[in-house]
Image (tube, rainbow, N blue to C red):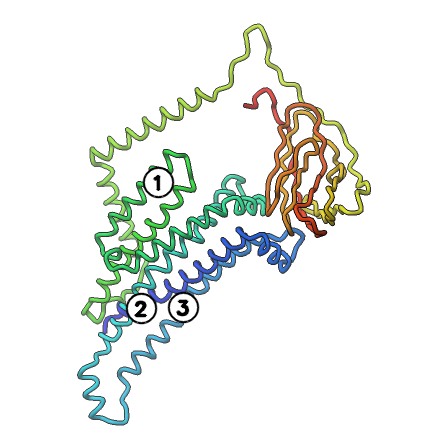
Amino acid sequence: MPHAIRRVVVARTARVAAGLALALGGAALVAVTLSPRLVHALDGMLPGVQPAGAATVLSAAWLLALASYAMSRARSEHRFAVAMSKFVLPGGDLDHDLQRLDHEHPDEMARGMAHHREIGSAAWPVLGVALALPPLGLYVAHAIAQRGWPVMAGFEESLAAHRHAFAWFGVAGVIGALAMTRQATRAPKAAAALLGLAFAIGLVATLQHSPAVGAVAIVPLTMALIVRRLRAERAAIAAIDPAAGSEILSLRDVLRATWTSLRALGRFAGRPATLRAVVGLVVIGVGWAYAHRVKHAPAAAPATQVATVAPAVPHVYPMQMPPSSLAIQQTMNGNGVIKIDADLDGKPLEVGHLAGLYNIPPSWRASIVIKLVGEPVLVTPFLGSAPETLENTQSFTSNGCGNVQPLGLRLEPTLSRPYHVTLYVTPTIAPVDCNHVE
């Protein structure tokens, strides 16, 4: 029996396990981001001053998928060996064994095991990737934007802001997984159509400047990759040579395959049509960048005036912690996060400072991220503006240009009964050049 059949059985079983783990973890992430009650319950079970429930679920989903893939491969190797042993081990009746082995061949039994796992190994990864890969991409985008590890408060806010998009990604994943159960979708000819669909989705997303729409292309791309993988696995299952699949990967093989790919890429890049396409894209990109720069260029100052920017000198405010209302208690931790516990009894509550800072100086901008643990409330950190409904995590940003803006916290209940809420406030204050603000 070719060794390639065993490799296909093991690989397909591992894909089923990893895809199922990603699908369950992604569904749990969508449920947590959509339900404030689940967020509150999960944050109550996690340690720390500012628990990141949604980010923890995302990390657990990917770790569980990797562990399931590795453990499933090891277990499938053992189960395959046991199943093959049962087919060839002799029984108590020699005549029955001869008749059984004359009609049942171990290699055909192994091929049947591989074919039986084809649908699950194609459907579950599509659903798992659709649910778990977009949140991971959002984390990578935060890491690139911040040039390091993302701030969990900002990442939690982004997860909450994109919760409806994640739910629609799950719907697209369900549709893709159901489509992969059809034999026509798993046929080799379907790969080109799936790649065309992904390209069309990416083009629409580019025209609409919508990354969320472009992320839907993950589903047809994953389906196309799986179709290509299934084509290679079918060829391995149909192999007759007993040595097929027993090759050992070596450094020489890797270098030879890399050199072959580079030569093919060089031949493709040297075609006249490829060169014309690249030159056209470069010209279009340079023209778009130049037009965008001209459109958003700041207006030049008149020749008779000298444009000077006076440095903003903030007022030194006292940083001691004066006692606030008995219904609102502020607690500082070591990483700049303010924990606020409030008991609401149907009346608005207001505290006139945040950690001793009473105002935002002129020419300074404040960005304050507030995460809620508990029932929804109306909240604003700027006492001169109207409160907004807070259900999970939200960011409040001041203009930064104008008069001194009072800073504090105003809470208004959304329920008639008394209830307790906990807020985690992450303030960030930085100077801003008001002469160049659009």
Where residue 392 appears, as percent x and y from the top left, is 59, 47
Task: Specify whether 198 is left or right of 337.
Answer: left
Amino acid carrying mark 3 in the image: Ser
Is 32 situated left or right of 101 in this image? right
Percent x, y of residue 340: 71, 47
Within 10 angstroms of label 3, few (less than 14), some, or many (20 or more) residues? many
Gap in angstroms between the C-alphas marked 3 and 1 = 35 Å
Q: Residue at position x 30%, y 83% from top?
A: 86
Q: Amino acid at mark 1?
A: Gly
Q: Which residue is mark 1?
A: 202
Gap between marks 2 and 1 measured at Cα: 34 Å
Instruction: Give x and y (percent) for residue 188.
Output: 22, 55
Q: Quadrant of residue 336?
A: top right
User: Circles 2 and 1: CB distance less than 8 Å?
Assistant: no
At horizontal 67% and vertical 52% (from top left) the residue drawn is 49
Q: Quadrant of the C terminus?
A: top right
SS class of the residue under badge 3? helix
> What is the secondary structure assignment of the residue under circle 1?
helix
Report, in whole angstroms, how far the alpha carbon at label 3 lies from the one at label 2.
11 Å
Q: Looking at the image, which is closer to me, 206 or 145?
A: 206
- Disc 3: which residue: 72
Which residue appears at 47% of the width and 49% of the height? Answer: 135
Q: Amino acid at mark 2?
A: Val
Residue where numbered disc 2 is placed: 9
